[in-house]
């Protein structure tokens, strides 16, 4: 069975003053359905934003961010549990830092935990532990965390559910006619130097962190699919219909001849997750 790591960001999961309950329920429904076909791991953001719903602190201050995360993590997990209960899906919480990927002992421990939870039909939910660790021990954004989780747990693909439809040729905010790049097989250094800030004050990523995650995946001969987390149509097409009309597939393999019509990249691609 193929293993898929999903990553969902704060902008999808939360509004400024509350958990985005309908969007979270839509996500949970997708994951519950995906578990019938794939092994599923979820990397989630949202603890700090969830904490802010209960306690209004300035997240720009490091200690306040830690407090918000400590308050928000149980709120976030409680929200997940109540929704996964609807689908009779048991969940587990796993908190990691960058340090967990630098130690063979630590890495083996979380690998075993994720493998064992999946073997017992439990969905592991991973988040970064930014409460008691130093800045040097943190990734700083869950795009990087999700790519490392996908690699070290031997997942077949990482799917990032974001607040954008995919990776555009140009910034769609400044050029409304910008087109989505359907397939990316190489990410150049200058693409990682561009300025593109998060759309949500509680988000820590942006397009650059997603490109870094994509390049990490491609450097390890794995794929990443970036699509919209507000509207899960593209994610469903990709997972269950082996096609997609929106979204960007990052793959180091040359898929252009096999899955795309050279002059019609806007058309639906086929067999993105190969069985």
Image (cartoon, rainbow, N blue to C red):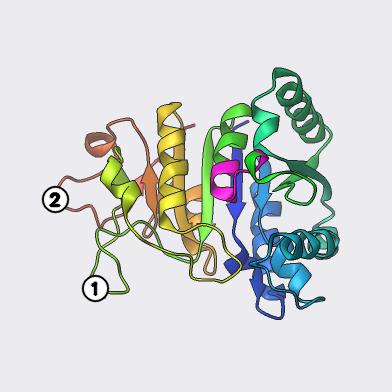
Decide whether residue 142 is among the magenta residues.
yes
Helix, strand or loop under label 1: loop
Which residue is drawn at the image coordinates 71% and 81% (left, top)? Answer: 17
- Furthest residue toward bottom: 17
The local crowd at label 2, few if under 14, some if 14 to 19, many if 20 or more residues have their Cα within 10 Å, is few
Residue at which label 1 appears? 175
Q: Quadrant of residue 112 in the image?
A: top right
Towards the viewer: 162 or 253 = 162
Q: Is residue 43 visible?
A: yes
Helix, strand or loop under label 2: loop
Identify whether 173 is placed above or below 263. Answer: below
- Furthest residue toward left: 263
Q: How many labels does the image show?
A: 2
Residue interval drawn in magenta: 137-146
The local crowd at label 1, few if under 14, some if 14 to 19, many if 20 or more residues have their Cα within 10 Å, is few
Circle 2 or circle 1, nearest the eye: 1
Where is residue 11 drawn, in percent x and y?
58, 68
Identify whether 109 is placed above or below 130. Answer: above
Where is residue 88 drawn, in percent x and y?
85, 54
Does the magenta stretch mainly form a helix, a strand or a loop?
helix
Which residue is drawn at the image coordinates 59% and 67% (left, top)? Answer: 12
């Amino acid at each position: 069975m193929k293993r898929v790591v999903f990553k969902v960001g704060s902008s999808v999961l939360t509004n400024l003053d509350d958990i985005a309950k309908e969007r979270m329920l839509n996500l949970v429904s997708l994951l519950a359905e995906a578990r019938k076909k794939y092994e599923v791991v979820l990397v989630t953001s949202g603890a700090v934003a969830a904490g802010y719903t209960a306690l209004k602190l300035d997240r720009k201050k490091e200690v306040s961010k830690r407090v918000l995360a400590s308050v928000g993590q149980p709120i976030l997990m409680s929200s997940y549990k109540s929704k996964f209960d609807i689908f009779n899906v048991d969940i587990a919480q796993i908190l990691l830092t960058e340090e967990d990927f630098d130690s063979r002992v630590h890495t083996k421990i979380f690998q075993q935990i994720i493998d064992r939870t999946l073997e017992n039909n439990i969905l592991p939910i991973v988040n970064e532990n930014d409460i008691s660790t130093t800045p040097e021990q943190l990734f700083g954004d869950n795009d990087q965390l999700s790519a490392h989780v996908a690699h070290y747990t031997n997942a077949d693909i990482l799917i990032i559910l974001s607040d954008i439809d995919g990776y555009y040729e140009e910034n769609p905010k400044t050029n409304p006619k910008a087109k989505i790049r359907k397939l990316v097989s190489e990410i150049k250094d200058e693409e990682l130097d561009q300025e593109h800030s998060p759309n949500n004050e509680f988000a820590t990523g942006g397009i650059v962190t997603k490109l870094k995650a994509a390049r990490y995946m491609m450097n390890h001969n794995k794929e990443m699919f970036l699509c919209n987390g507000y509207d899960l149509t593209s994610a469903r097409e990709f997972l269950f219909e082996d096609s997609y009309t929106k979204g960007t597939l990052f793959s180091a393999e040359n898929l252009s001849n096999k899955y795309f019509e050279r002059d019609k990249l806007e058309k639906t691609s086929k067999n993105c997750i190969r069985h």
